[in-house]
Image: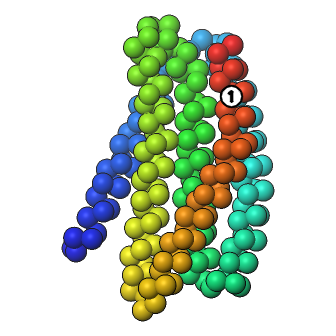
Amino acid sequence: MTPQLLIFAPIALTLGYGAYLVGWLHRQPAGTSEQIEISEAIKVGADAYLNRQYRTVGLVAVILAALLYIVLGWFVAVGFLAGAIASTASGYVGMMIAVRSNSKTTAAALRGLNPALTLAFKAGAVTGFFVVALSLLSVAVFYFWGVNSSDANALRNGLIGLSFGASLISVFARLGGGIFTKAADVGADL
């Protein structure tokens, strides 16, 4: 194994710990029947929102990837799509964890401040771990795939396309997702 491949070890550990936290959060009590009812309504809304958002953003991403393919070549277009997919996966996991953790955090607050802060911190950490791990994974895979290319400019441009794809999805998620998560937080607080 070459030393460059060691980058995959922390990525695997990060994804593994993120998955462990997801399991831990899943096992936490969801709260009272009223909290669960509100949480379920928020989940339904979040699912509908994400499905609609990602259908729209997916269409825009496919059109942009086609344009990038025509203008800059297939390596840039593939990089763009890889970045968009990694960013979409991170956003989806983050939103699902946030929505499912609201009522659990409220239920934990009934036991005290420390349990509530611990749960909220771990729920937020899941998003951070997945964003970092999927970002590094997409860059590492794309780099190792493209480093064998005889054209260094193609690799550089492909990595730029990757970052552009990730940024595009992130912008869409921040614009709409920020509004939705604020509504979900208020609903859970009620």
Q: In the figure, is residue 81 to the left or right of 105?
A: right
State how many labels appear. 1
Q: In the figure, is residue 15 to the left or right of 29?
A: left
**Residue at the spot 65% in from the left edge and 24% down from the top edge:** 185
Q: Position of residue 51 (x, y in %)?
A: 73, 48
Residue 174 drawn above or below residue 165 = above
Image-quadrant location for residue 66 = bottom right
Q: Position of residue 10 (x, y in %)?
A: 30, 54
**Residue at the spot 48% in from the left edge and 49% down from the top edge:** 131
Query: In which quadrant will I find the C terminus?
Result: top right
Q: Position of residue 146 (x, y in %)?
A: 44, 81
**Residue at the spot 55% in from the left edge and 27% down from the top edge:** 101
Q: Position of residue 178 (x, y in %)?
A: 68, 37
Residue 59 drawn above or below residue 181 = below
* Residue placed most toward the observer, 73 or 106: 73
* Residue placed most toward the observer, 159 or 126: 159
Residue type marked 1: Lys
Residue 17 drawn above or below residue 161 = above
Q: Quickly name the residue at label 1.
A: 182
* Residue placed most toward the observer, 129 or 29: 129
**Residue at the spot 60% in from the left edge and 11% down from the top edge:** 32
Query: In which quadrant will I find the N terminus?
Result: bottom left
Q: Please tell me how crowded label 1 is: few (under 14), some (14-19), or many (20+) other residues with Cα within 10 Å.
A: few
Image-quadrant location for residue 23 = top left
- Residue 96 in view: yes
Q: Secondary structure at mark 1?
A: helix
Q: In the figure, is residue 170 to the left or right of 157?
A: right
- Residue 85 in view: no
